[in-house]
Amino acid sequence: MAKHKIATREEWQAARNELLAQEKVLTRRGDQLAAERRNLPWVPIEKEYSFDTDNGPKTLPELFDGRSQLLAYHFMFGPAYTAGCPVCSSAADTFNGAVAHLNARDVTFSCISRAPLDKLQGYKRRMGWSFPWASSYGTDYNFDLEISRQEEATREMLAGGVPPVAVQLAQECGTDPAAYLSEAPVMSAYALEDGAAYLTYSTTARGLEFMMGYYGFLDRTPVGRNEGDPPQLWVRRHDEYDSRYAPGR
C-alpha cells in the first residue's frame, strides 16, 4: 500500500465529514444529470428489425415484453467470437439480480449481441446467467444504431497498429482484433408509445461504469482500483481468476 496518515478517531471523523460534504454535492449533481437524461428528445426507430430470442423471433417493440421501457445492453459478442468479451462478462454478473427489480418499475432488460442465438445460449449456461439475451445476427440493427461497424472499416482503422490490449481481448474471445473491435459496448434506453419504439438515451465507454458494480466497491477500499498508470487489464470472466484469489484463501 502507499504511505498513509495515521490519525485519531476524532481527526478521522473531521476529515470524513469534509469528504461527506463533497460526496453530497456529487450525489445532488448526479440527480440533476439523471433528470437531464430523462429530458432528452426521443428518436423514432422506424425500421423493423427481427431478433432471435429464447421465445422465438421478436421485433424491437416485442422485446419490451408488455412494458413501456426497455434497457438494452449491447454485449460485445460478434459472430466470429467463440466467447463473450471478458469486460462485458464482468458487468453481466450483476444483471440477473437486477431484472426483477427493473420489471417491477415497468422496465424490461435485455442484452443484444450479433452472435447467433445458440452461441449466446451456450455462453449463458457456462456463466450461469438467466437474463434475457437476444441475437441481432443477420440484421442491420447494430450497424444502423452505430453500435457495430463493418470489419473492413475496422481493419483500415487498425492499419497503423493494433493496441496490445485489443490483441489480448481478441485472443480471449477467440477472434482477431478487427473482428473484436468491430463491436462496441453500448447501453441504450428505449420507450414504447402507441406501438412505436423510440431511442431515448445511449452511453458507452466510461459511461457504462455504473454497470460494473465491483468498481464502486473498489473505489471505497484503501488501495482503490489499483490498475496502474496506464491502467492494466486485470478483469477476467468470473471462472477464470487465479485460484489464489478464490473465496476462503
Image (tube, rainbow, N blue to C red):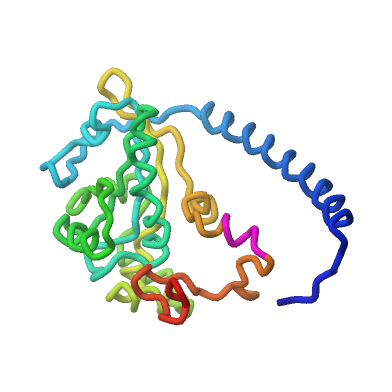
Residue 160 visible (yes or no): no
Percent from the top left, x then y, of residue 94? 40, 52
Percent from the top left, x then y, of residue 24? 73, 39
Q: Quadrant of the N terminus?
A: bottom right
Relative to 100, residue 8 above or below:
below
Let me know if residue 125 is in the magenta part. no
Q: Residue furthest left?
A: 56
Residue in view at x 50 percent, y 54 percent: 213
Residue in view at x 31 percent, y 76 percent: 176
Q: Quadrant of residue 216?
A: bottom right
Q: How many numbered marks have been drawn onto this rendered protein structure? A: 0
* 220 vs 176, nearest the viewer: 220
204 with respect to 240 (left or right): right
Percent from the top left, x then y, of residue 185? 41, 55
Q: Residue furthest top?
A: 194
208 with respect to 225 (left or right): left
Residue in view at x 55 percent, y 59 percent: 215
Relative to 213, residue 188 above or below:
above
Relative to 56, residue 193 above or below:
above
Percent from the top left, x then y, of residue 218? 59, 62
Q: Quadrant of residue 103?
A: top left
65 with respect to 15 (left or right): left
Let me know if residue 217 is in the magenta part. yes
The magenta segment is 216-221
Residue 45 visible (yes or no): yes
